[in-house]
Image: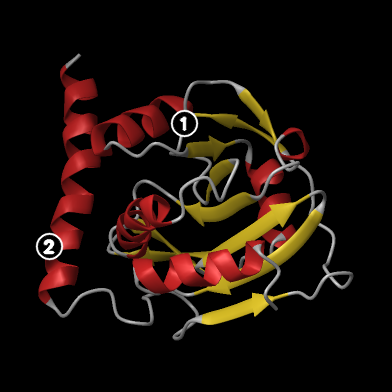
Amino acid sequence: MRLQYLLLFVAVLIPIVVAVIFTSQGGYGEGHFGIFERVVPVCYPPGREPPAADFSLIDQYNRTVTLSELWSKPVLVTFTYTYCPDVCPVMHLVLNKTLPLVPGLFGAVLDVSLDPERDTPRRLLAYSKGNNYNWTFLTGSYSQLEAVWKAYGVTRYVENRGGTPYIVHDVVWAVVQDGKILGVVKGIPSPETLADLLKKIVRREC
């Protein structure tokens, strides 16, 4: 029981600390700490959208979630992990402030784990509830997740930093509907900029 409370405390504390540091250094900025150093939006014109890979993964409530069962409406897909010390808490902060700016735009928001070994459903539930994040966190086996990363153009590799695994990865926000990728935003814009870019992609203003 003590371990459970400790994990919940850590899950809540990390995003708060990172958010305070990040905003104290001048806000969100138009870049991020990942592989890409600038915001790159891509909106595919109607009829030229690449196919979206379907997948079935497990959410924080230990339920199976299948993308194709959701994509009759636009779905936002992104990639993070809960033990991330820098990029992901900022992504979550931005996403949490972006969603109220685009009410009803997405039928679902799917946050796919980059850390299958540590991001168990129980961990994802503690993290999402502890931070009041009301979107769907997904995990699975390494092979399942690796297939999704590759399908959505997410480069991901692990570095050893002081004996602790650190996952370096692309920051990707992909908009999917009816088996197609409507567009992608790479990088971490401000919530206002991300909201504007996502609206343009969904509305096909390419």
Mark 1 or mark 2, earlier in chain: 2
Which residue occupies 18% across, 24% down? 5
At horizontal 48% and vertical 21% (from top left) the residue drawn is 61
Question: Where residue 67 appears, x then y in whole percent?
Answer: 71, 39
Task: Kindly report which numbered mark, 1 or 2, lies closer to the viewer in this rendering.
Answer: 2
Q: Nearer the viewer, residue 23 or 59?
A: 23
Task: Report the front residue among 47 and 84.
Answer: 47
**Dot 2: what SS?**
helix
Image coordinates of residue 12 in percent, x first then y, are 20, 40
- Place of residue 84 in the rendered image (x, y in percent of width and height, measured from the top left): 34, 55
**Residue 140: image x %, image y %?**
61, 35
- Indicate whether 171 appears above or below 12: below
Closest to the observer, 99 or 161:
99
**Who's the residue at 59% across and 29% down the image?**
58
Name the element at disc 1.
loop
Q: Which quarter of the image is occupied by the N terminus? A: top left
Relative to 64, say whether 147 is above or below.
below
Horizontal side of residue 120 vs 123, given as left or right: right
Q: Which residue corresponds to mark 2?
A: 20
Q: Which mark is residue 120?
A: 1
Identify the amino acid type marked 2.
Val
- Answer whether residue 188 is visible to the viewer in this image: no
Q: Report the residue that reaches farthest toward the bottom.
A: 38
Residue 64 vs 90, above or below: the answer is: above
Residue 19 left/right relative to 190: left
Identify residue type, mark 1: Thr
Quadrant holding the C terminus: bottom right
Marks 1 and 2 sit apart, C-alpha to C-alpha, by 27 Å
Q: Can residue 197 be seen?
A: yes
